[in-house]
Amino acid sequence: MVSQIKDEPLACLRQKRSRRRRRKNTLPLSLRVAMRLAASKAPTSLLPPLPWLLVSLLALGAGTGTARAAGPETREQGRTEAAGSQVGQLLRQVVEERLRECHLVVFGEAGLPGSIIATLLRSPLDFDVLMNISLEYHNASFHSLALALVSPGTSGAGTGTARAAGPETREQDRTEAAGSQVGQLLRQVVEERLRECHLVVFGEAGLPGSIIATLLRSLGESGYTSRTVVDITSLDEASEFYDPLTEDLRGLGMLNCRAFLIDVSPLQSQALLRFMEDIELYKKSETYVLLVGPEDRAGDFLSHPVFRNTANMLYFGHPIRPAAKGVPGLTSAQGQFSTSTKRRSISPQFSRSQFVHDNETGREQRIVTYTRCFYCNDGEEKQFILDTWTPHAGFANSANLFPDQFKTFYGHKFNVVAMNWFPFTKFIQHSEEGGTVVTPQDSLDIRMLNALAKALNFTYEMRTPWDNQWGTSTPSGNWTGIVGTLQHHKGDFSMMLSWMEPRLPIVDYSRIYASEPLVMVTSKPKPLSQAFALVRPFAASLWFVTVASTLAAGMLLWLLQLWWSGMSGGEKIKFGDATLMTWGILLEDPPVNIPRNVTAQMLIGWWWVYCMLITITYRSSLVAHLTVPGKSPTLDSLEDLLAAHRKTSWTWGFEPTYGSGWEWLKSNENPTVKEIFNSIMVLDLNEQLSRVLSGRHAFITWKYYSKSVIGSRYTNDRGYSPLHTGRQDFFNYGGYGWGFRKGAPFRRRFDQMKQRLIESGSIPFWLNDLIETSARQTRAENKRKEGEQGKGDAMGEQATQESSSLKVLGLGHMQGIFYILIIGLLFSATVFLGELMAHRYCRPAYL
């Protein structure tokens, strides 16, 4: 690897060359650049040792060959060209045999005919090397390195242009001066307005004296390193480097600020425009785009579909005509630029003598700045001249180059796509066919949209999607419904649309303003039969413990009396009498004769306290169960639904909207959700709710949507509804936002206005107000309709029975007592028959 070259060896080298030649001589610029790179702190791991040595040899050869080629055409010149050709062939052989896999950086006057570098670049492998070098320069610039790696022709544009130029004519001088003016203007704009942005330059970087070469040289001198250079002559879709280059430039879209500077002066610009489409420029509307080209082509580029979403776009029209095929393009005079990086206004900071006057008019050449406004022409697009620039006077009007276009839309009409989904969106659909115009009604999104339309001065036309669906993916990569409409740019934006990760590459979302999870709607539990009202106050386990403790207390009393009579000779007690004594105390019928010993009396006393607490608790609970009948358990989760399905064959369904909820059910890997999806029934709203009211059917839907439907259709004046909404939220996707076609430039402005509505608290207030108002209006309307009175009376009677504070017990409440009486009588009759049988067949003989 070449070691760092300090100032002392360089001075010695200059003294030796000065003594050898008695004329002013300096090292070639290519060698000075190579020495500067070697002495810099650039990462040497990017280039292997051998190419650095080759770079030095090429630089030396280029410098000597150039000096000889500049003289008159003599026999000595012919020998020099022959020698240069031989050296070039030698270098080519070394590169092809030893350095084929290496990164080759060439410094020299590639544009000078007959030079060693020009001979080397005529090799068949040169095109691949040129593409590789151009792409490597792109990658190095992407990482903001100060190392300048350009295609071979670029160095000639910066150093050898004056020497490699053709005959010096008046027209050429005008071209050189105009190119320098445009480059200096672009430098001023970049330093003043785009200093914090990553600059991507598209142009013929290898063309000597081009505007791009002038700009790159001046930006390098000013210290602007955050840039990427793409040589448009290398944009070949068939190249293996085309796809990696497009991916890298798409990745630049993640930067906070990026600017594209595009030289469209060449006549063939179709490949460049296709490349702009491939890197998806239309998806990044905030990208700054600066176009440079002839004045008469401004309208063509400003209205080109590639830039359909670009909000910050300027076209600098210069008076230079595009060069014909095979003729070198713009040449550049070496202007003197200030290296200061301080911020300054966009006005010329150069001497008037640096520029050439128009010889015909005596005035300086002007550069016209064109721009485009999306909605300035009564809501339509308008192209106009923003300002003009001259070297001496600068911008004539000092106009703001990048004004805010979205403070007002001048009455522009937007195409809005929406689905009927109250309380968020509601409209009157005049036809069942999809894609028809609808009439918006009062709802949350319509209130928000009207507020934005009034503040931003725009109108809208609302339609349904062509297939009346929210949007789901298809195997072909297209989407249906609202998402598909935005995917194909058939609508500007939509009303409420669920945030879903699979939709993010297709549409842009606005800020989330509401969240709505999935819930399950079932019929309210039916009242339980009053036949078992007497046993419901206690659980089965408590009943078991009560009975067992009663028997145990009777046995303990019998054993205690048996032991006491054996010790003291007192009276014994039978086991049956002891058990009946404990049962009598439990049933609040205490015995008349209790044992006389203190031990038995202590046992009976504590048993009495226990039975008193049990009976008081049972009595109070029994009153509650008799007045308010119990109900069957509610279904609050998908697990409860599957458990009920296994016992009594439940069903469940979903509306045919096929939105985010359907996508969640379809793609979920949870076994419970999979089982639910495999048996789901797709029915419309009325059919779903009819099945729910009939029983044993669950309707899976959205929370606020179901709340509004239940409140308006199935709730009476007393607030009673026969429908139950489960407590568990199944799927909360993140919230609702508005969907925008990809790259819509006005989305940020809409977000700002919606954020104001969110911060003011208007959205939750509107949402609750809409649900309550709709419920009241619908109930009042249903009350006036004929045929609904009976249904309302039935619901009102049921609600009255459940909500009244005074309960009159009837036969239905006390039926359990009669069942117990009947069971007791049957048991007694059975015992009586048993005694008769035993008395008849088992009677002793002496009787």
Image (cartoon, rainbow, N blue to C red):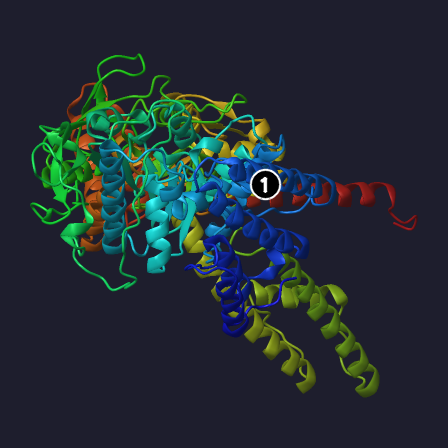
In the displayed structure, does residue 340 sit left or right of residue 499? left
Structural crowding at the residue carrying mark 1, measured as other residues with C-alpha within 10 Å and reported as few (<14), some (14–19) or many (≥20): many
Rendered location of residue 216, percent (x, y): 37, 48
Q: Secondary structure at mark 1?
A: helix
Asked whether 649 or 306 is in front, the reply is 306
Rendered location of residue 571, percent (x, y): 76, 78
Residue 54 vertical position relative to residue 564 in the rendered view, above or below: above
Amino acid residing under circle 1: Gly
Image point (34%, 39%), residue name: 210
Asked whether 666 or 151 is in front, the reply is 151
- Which of the 4 quarters of the picture holds residue 597? bottom right
Image point (41%, 38%), residue name: 524
Label 1 sits on residue: 84
Rendered location of residue 648, percent (x, y): 58, 31
Asked whether 16 or 583 is in front, the reply is 16
- Which of the 4 quarters of the picture holds residue 308? top left
Image point (22%, 18%), residue name: 437
Image point (55%, 43%), residue name: 133
Residue 706 showing in the rendered view:
no
Residue 559 vertical position relative to residue 517 in the rendered view, above or below: below
Image quarter (top left, top right, bottom left or bottom right) of the N terminus: bottom right
